[in-house]
Image (tube, helix red, strand yellow):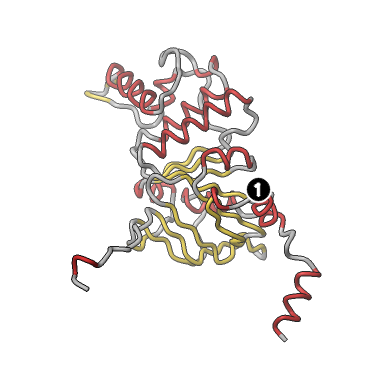
């Protein structure tokens, strides 16, 4: 067989790869041997019951907590995340559930809060306004004006502003922590459309959610955490709702299955 007949089957290198991540708080082991991969243009849903370790893992990725041990790779190269600055400089943006918006400020001020564009000590208002519209158009967002107070926006529109703000630093990966929590049907659809826009723009998205309908709607893969450990990684189109729930609840891990497994090993 000639060289021309050889098919290149090399898998693409993940944007972010975690291997063997552990994190403890005193005697409490929050994460044990966690592995996770995220590629460009991919939505990965991170699911699990309360106490599964989702929030701790997000905070490790955001640099709020440092992992006790394990390996982190960015575009295949080993790296460390020991602070929020490390996370941001790599290209990871995090949108927390509380959104952290200033209701009394307008859209432009919220988007550039802490990252204001200045020249000669003066704010470059026109440039910030233009970039605000550019970011919102990139997300196909429906915001009536960038000069209205955020307090007057709906829940879905506020989530839009929070996601758009995360793009100001031009990240490669966006972490969304329960973005549709407490939203109505129409607003949830609006946010899921935003998630799809992020994927279409080539970003990797980690979606933390309890909503299986959201997972089915936009996720390419589902990573399940249970009691601080990996408990399954699934391709969304190839797994049933019941299989995901079983992995989340540990329903397959009971006395009967353990006895059967023990008998098979004898």
Q: Nearer the viewer, residue 9 or 208?
A: 9
Quarter-of-image position of residue 22: bottom right
Is residue 66 depicted above or below 98 in this figure? below
Say which of 182 and 184 sits in front.
184
| Residue at figure coordinates x 55%, y 52% from the top left | 238
Image quadrant holding the N terminus, namely: bottom left
Q: Quadrant of residue 110?
A: top left
x, y (%) of residue 71? 44, 65
Closer-to-camera residue (52/25): 52
Circle 1 — which element? helix
Left or right side of 246 for 159: left
As displayed, is residue 91 above or below residue 146?
A: below
Which quarter of the rendering shows the C terminus? bottom right
Tell me: 178 left or right of 173. Answer: right
What percent of the width, then of the height, locates residue 192?
A: 52, 32
What residue did someone put label 1 on? 241
Vertical placement of residue 142 versus 63, above or below: above
Spot the residue most to the right. 255
Crowding near pointer 1: few (<14 within 10 Å), some, many (20+)? Answer: few
Which residue is at the front of the view, 3 or 146?
Answer: 3
Residue 10 in the image: state x and y as whole percent. 32, 63
Residue 107 lies left or right of residue 99; in this view the side is: left
Residue shown at the point (52%, 53%) measured from the top left = 235
Name the residue: 48% across, 43% down. 175
């Amino acid at each position: 067989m000639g060289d021309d007949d050889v098919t290149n089957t090399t898998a693409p290198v993940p944007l972010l790869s975690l291997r063997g991540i552990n994190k403890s708080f005193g005697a409490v082991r929050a994460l044990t041997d966690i592995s996770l991969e995220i590629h460009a243009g991919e939505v990965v849903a991170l699911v699990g019951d309360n106490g599964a370790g989702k929030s701790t893992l997000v905070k490790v990725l955001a640099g709020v907590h440092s992992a006790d041990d394990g390996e982190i790779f960015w575009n295949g190269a080993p790296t460390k995340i020991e602070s929020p600055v490390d996370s941001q400089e790599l290209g990871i943006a995090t949108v927390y559930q509380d959104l952290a918006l200033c209701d009394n400020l307008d859209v432009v001020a919220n988007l550039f809060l802490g990252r204001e564009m200045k020249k000669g000590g003066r704010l470059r208002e026109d440039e910030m306004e233009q970039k605000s519209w550019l970011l919102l158009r990139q997300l196909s967002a429906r915001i009536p004006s960038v000069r209205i107070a955020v307090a007057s926006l709906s829940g879905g529109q506020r989530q839009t502003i929070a996601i758009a703000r995360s793009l100001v630093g031009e990240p490669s990966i966006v972490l969304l922590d329960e973005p549709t929590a407490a939203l109505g049907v129409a607003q949830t659809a609006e946010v899921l459309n935003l998630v799809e826009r992020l994927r279409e723009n080539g970003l990797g998205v980690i979606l933390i959610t309890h909503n299986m309908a959201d997972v089915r709607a936009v996720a390419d893969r589902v990573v399940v955490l249970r009691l601080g450990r990996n408990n399954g990684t699934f391709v969304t189109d190839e797994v049933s709702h019941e299989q995901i729930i079983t992995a989340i609840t540990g329903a397959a891990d009971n006395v009967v299955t353990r006895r059967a497994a023990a008998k098979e090993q004898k």
